[in-house]
Amino acid sequence: MDIATLIGIIAGAGVIFGAILMGGSLDSFVDVPSIMVVFGGTAAATLIKFPMRDVVKSLKIGVGIAFKNPKEDPLSIYEKAIELATLVRKNGLLGLENVEVENEIMARGIRMCVDGHSGEVIRSSISSEVEKSIQNDELGELMFRGIGDTAPAFGMIGTLVGLVQMLANLSDPDAIGPAMAIAMLTTFYGAVLANLIALPIADKLALKVDRLRNTKQLIIESVVQIQASQSPMVMKEILGPYLPGGVPADEDAGA
């Protein structure tokens, strides 16, 4: 689990609640109509922007990526690729027939190598599968970014509604202060929803999707080079740039 996401949300909420309690009562920051305008309006706009099936799927994917660490470890894939390349140099591609590979995409590519497919066919086939997977992950980012863009707008809409209602009752000076406070709450709700939840999660999704795309490219390049019976030493040079931290120091020394 990506504990940083959870810690960030809890810490942000704690700071806000702490500031509220230090300066007054929490009850003054709770207004049902304002909540309805911001959260209901944001939900409605999201449904207008995206098809229903995409809303459900992208929210599930987005939350999954934001709160979980990726299963695919680039270093493990790199080490497995070097191991398989060494095996191919000794026994040929048929030597991979009974090899177990945990990563599903890599395992599929290795099966295609054993079946005699060319490197171009393997690259094209796996790339299509990878691109489809990445597009699904990117949809989660678009969803949360859309929520982050919409929430403040509905906060402003709620504020304008409250101001209109306040101005319609100027004959009662005692009601102006409370009405203004309620009108401002919608802006508060919209800002919190956007800047504490939606936009940070969207940014984290963008970062993780970018890293995931890099890992997928590492898998594709690994399989293509294995199919070409590339030497392990050359593979280290080719695959090294795909590793977030570069080639491990012990391997650099060995090279």
Image (cartoon, helix red, strand yellow):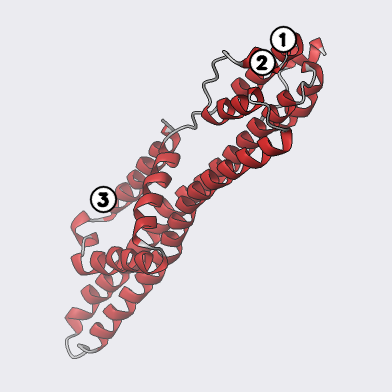
Counting from the top left corner in percent of width and height, residue 209 is at 55, 43
Amino acid type at image mark 2: Leu
Q: Is residue 146 above or below residue 13?
A: below
- Foreground mark, 3 or 1, reads 1
- What residue appears at the point 80 percent right and 12 percent down from the top-left corner? 253
Viewport quadrant of the N terminus: top left
Q: How far apart are labels 3 and 2 at the CA level?
A: 69 Å
- Residue 240 vs 198, above or below: the answer is above
Q: Earlier in the sequence, mark 3 or mark 2?
A: 3
**Amino acid at pointer 3:** Leu
Neighbor class of circle 2 (other Cα within 10 Å; few <14, some 14-19, many 20+) is: some
Quarter of the rendering containing residue 77: top right
Q: Position of residue 109 (x, y in %)?
A: 61, 29
Q: Residue at 80% across / 17% down in the picture?
A: 233
* Mark seen at residue 21: 3
Q: Residue furthest front?
A: 116
Marks 1,2: beta carbons within 8 A: yes
Residue tagged 2: 94
The residue lying toward the viewer, choosing from 130 and 175, is 130
The disc, 3 or 1, on the residue closer to the chain's N-terminal end is 3
The residue lying at 63 percent from left, 31 percent from top is 219
Which element is circle 1 on? helix
Q: Are marks 3 and 1 in contact (CB under 8 Å)?
A: no
Which residue is nearer to you in this view: 222 or 55? 222
Residue that mark 1 sits on = 91
Is residue 164 visible in the rendered image? The answer is: yes
**How far across and how far down the image is residue 164, in percent?**
28, 85
Total numbered labels placed on residues in the image:
3
